[in-house]
Image (tube, grey):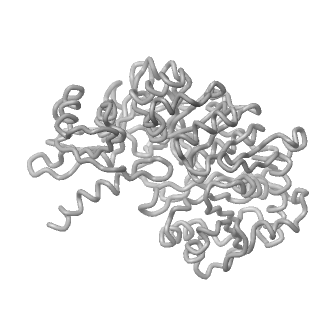
Amino acid sequence: MYPDPIAAARPDALAYVMAESGDRLTYRELDERSNQLAQLLRSRGIGPGGTLLIIAENRIEWPVVVAAGMRAGLYVTPVNWHLTDRELAGMLDESLSGGAAAAVVTSAGRAEAVSAALGERAVMGLCLDGDRGRFESFHEAIATQPVSPIPDELLGARVLYSGGTTGRPKAFRQELLGVHPRQAPPRHSGLTAKLGIDGGTTFLSPAPNYHAAPFTFQLITLGLGGTVICLERFDPAAALCAIQRYRVSHSQWVPTMLLRLLRLPEAERHIYDLSSHRVAFTSGAPCAPELKQSIMDWWGPILHEYYGASEGYGHTYVAPAEALAHPGTVGRPLTGALHVTGEDATEVPTGVVGKVWFETAATGYRNSDDNPARIHPQGWRSVGDLGHLDDEGFLYLVGRESHTIISGGVNIYPTEIENALLAHPAVADAAVFGVPDPEFGEQVKAVVETREPVTDTELIEFCRARLARFKAPKSIDFADRLPRLPTGKLNKNILRDRYLQPARNDS
């Protein structure tokens, strides 16, 4: 993302708008302010190969920080701002371990936790809300800097973290290519073409900016000269209002957001003018066929889906018409090839579930926690997802290796059970996992959110009518809200641990 050429051609074109407040940046303002920050970073000794962290809520300064790092040859590193100081410390240990000069940009609400996580590290600190302890005022600091580009502009690189709020942080770094930002290679060009993103796009970004998908598609949109409409925080009614208010053409969602949109009262859903909205796309987790059908019944056949991972190994894509013809698929590969293998690492026949691998040339992206179990002898890469291919090469995911339930020696995959539960009109959200069983080893457990009263017996019978009997939940609990990360992904490990903890204490 390099705003200079767009600012030169269309200086007053809108680059970035905060949906609720209406705060906005033109391309001229984005170009000048990112130049000022790049100048400040250079003046403080932060040169190519340094790290620029942003730990802040969705706000208008986000694209300024990102653009500055991307034109200054830095590792631009968005971090989950919800993390505690202890969790942040683990990520900062990893991101600052190379010893290169670094800066961190944060907000008043996160300054104390970030300061505690940094400890005694000599890191430049800027606060978006004025001076806060060790952090100097972001706006005052850049105000004195030139608006012209630094003389040694170089293309920066993205750093994304995987792993949510638990476990050792894993970083996925793009390579620093050592080229001028004008020479940046196109990112995800195949997917961008399928989705029709261009300089006329008005893109609604409703998720936290630090997550891979919104971060990536904001960069793509701004790189092409489109306009990003950023929600301060996800709210279903606010999202629909933003589509109407800003005449949004494109939007990106995770399935949980789509569920919450559908949960709005019927009358409220239809008061908004969504006629400008011509492309929606979902990722982050497989979108249940019934959910996808319900959204397209409402919005029309505009919901695209892609599947990939932060590691950048590859992507699949499915167009709306293909999704309706192949319910449940996450599509076919956009580049390279897909392979599905058994436990012996050999490929399995069509229709047989196994580990999903991308045949990829992406070797320099991931440089943290390279797990040998995720690297095939042929050099293919996997993130541990399980699925199968059909005769036309469409991929269907059934879950993660670590979430597979083994009951009586039979593998059971939670995704199809969750989809069955979500087909019930009373169910708003569902999570399925295995819990210990003295006879079969594990049994199927479900926890659901409901939108109207329903009994566990009714839901179990509903599943038995749609699935083999051994796949149906043996027990169902009800929750006010399932534990999901701010990105919308289900934090199944935390949920499962709640049920395993008593068994651990008894052992």
From the viewer's perspective, tell me whether residue 227 is left or right of residue 339: right
Residue 59 picture quarter: bottom right
Tell whether 500 sits left or right of 341: left
Image: 467 above or below 357: above
Q: Position of residue 214 (x, y in %)?
A: 60, 45
Q: Point out residue 169 in the picture as x, y percentages from the top left corner.
A: 49, 62
Residue 163 vs residue 94, the one in the foreground: 163
- Closer to the camera in the image, 127 or 375: 127
Locate residue 437, reporting x and y percent.
Answer: 13, 50
Q: Left of 221 or right of it: where is 9? A: right
Q: Point out the image quarter for the C terminus.
A: bottom left
Direction left: furthest residue: 439
Q: Is residue 285 above or below residue 349?
A: below
- The one of 506 and 441 positioned closer to us in this rendering: 506
> Percent x, y for residue 495?
32, 54
Image point (72%, 75%), residue name: 131
